[in-house]
Image (cartoon, helix red, strand yellow):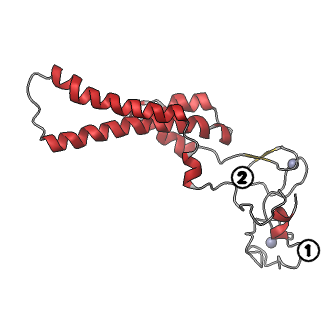
């Protein structure tokens, strides 16, 4: 907290690698099993029950079966991701994990359409913060840079407020920097 330059300005955007870290180990293991099971089913189980030889050429069949396996694996990874992603957005983990199991990936698509922004805790008092807050509702800690005249959002690099033209550098410390110089 002493390092004011090293802190990231945005709390709603996380790099893709951070998102990948949300995928739990059991889900990665489950994805590998799902892939293996899909291969087993299409290469071993299905040909035994088929009475006439498949008319699909082998390279194409290879491609199809690998695709089905990858899809099954992706499904398990998505369910794992949702169980970790839903709680940090204040959404029900069990409800959305259950929803994600819906056939055809409908639940997964619904999840990404409907998911709430990431919620955060106030660095000063730990109160629940939503992504559009500028100040903590419990202790007035400034969590996002904003204009001191119109109190609308400012970017840390702005010199003038884009809404009212207020000179953001006139304040000491500048309003846009307050969130980062405290703490
Ligand atoms: Zn607070
Ligand atoms: Zn303003």
45 vs 166: above or below:
above
**Quadrant in the picture for residue 161:** bottom right
Measured as percent of width and height from the top left, residue 37 is found at 33, 28
Measured as percent of width and height from the top left, residue 165 is found at 78, 79
Q: Residue at x 81, y 62 (%)?
A: 3
Residue corresponding to mark 1: 172
Residue in front for this viewpoint, 123 or 28 = 28
Residue in front for this viewpoint, 163 or 86 = 86
Residue corresponding to mark 2: 131
Q: Residue at x 26, y 37 (%)?
A: 65
Locate the N terminus and report the quarter of the image it occupies: bottom right
177 vs 53: above or below:
below
Crowd rating for badge 1 (residues with CA inside 10 Å; few <14, some 14–19, many 20+): few
Locate the C terminus and report the quarter of the image it occupies: bottom right
Mark before the other along the chain sequence, 1 or 2: 2
Q: Are marks 1 and 2 in contact (CB under 8 Å)?
A: no
Q: Secondary structure at mark 2?
A: loop
30 vs 125: above or below:
above
Measured as percent of width and height from the top left, residue 84 is found at 60, 37
Measured as percent of width and height from the top left, residue 155 is found at 73, 69
User: Can the viewer see residue 27?
Assistant: yes
Q: How many marks?
A: 2
Mark 1 vs ligand 2: CB below 8 Å: no
Q: CA distance from mark 1 to mark 2?
A: 26 Å
**Quadrant in the picture for residue 114:** top right
Residue in front for this viewpoint, 134 or 157 = 157
Q: Residue at x 59, y 56 (%)?
A: 15
């Amino acid at each position: 907290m002493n390092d004011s330059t090293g802190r990231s300005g945005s709390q709603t955007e996380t790099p893709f690698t951070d998102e990948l870290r949300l995928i739990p180990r059991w889900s990665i293991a489950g994805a590998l099993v799902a892939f293996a099971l899909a291969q087993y089913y299409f290469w071993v189980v299905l040909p035994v029950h088929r009475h006439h030889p498949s008319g699909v050429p082998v390279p194409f069949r290879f491609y199809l079966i690998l695709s089905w396996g990858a899809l099954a694996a992706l499904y398990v990874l998505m369910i794992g991701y949702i169980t970790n992603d839903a709680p940090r957005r204040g959404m029900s983990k069990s409800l959305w994990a259950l929803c994600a199991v819906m056939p055809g990936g409908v639940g997964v698509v619904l999840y990404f359409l409907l998911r709430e922004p990431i919620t955060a805790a106030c660095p000063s008092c730990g109160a629940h913060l939503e992504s559009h807050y500028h100040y903590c509702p419990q202790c007035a800690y400034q969590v996002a840079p904003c204009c001191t005249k119109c109190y609308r959002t400012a970017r840390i690099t702005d010199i003038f407020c884009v809404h009212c033209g207020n000179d953001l550098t006139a304040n000491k410390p500048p309003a846009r920097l307050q969130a980062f110089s405290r703490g």
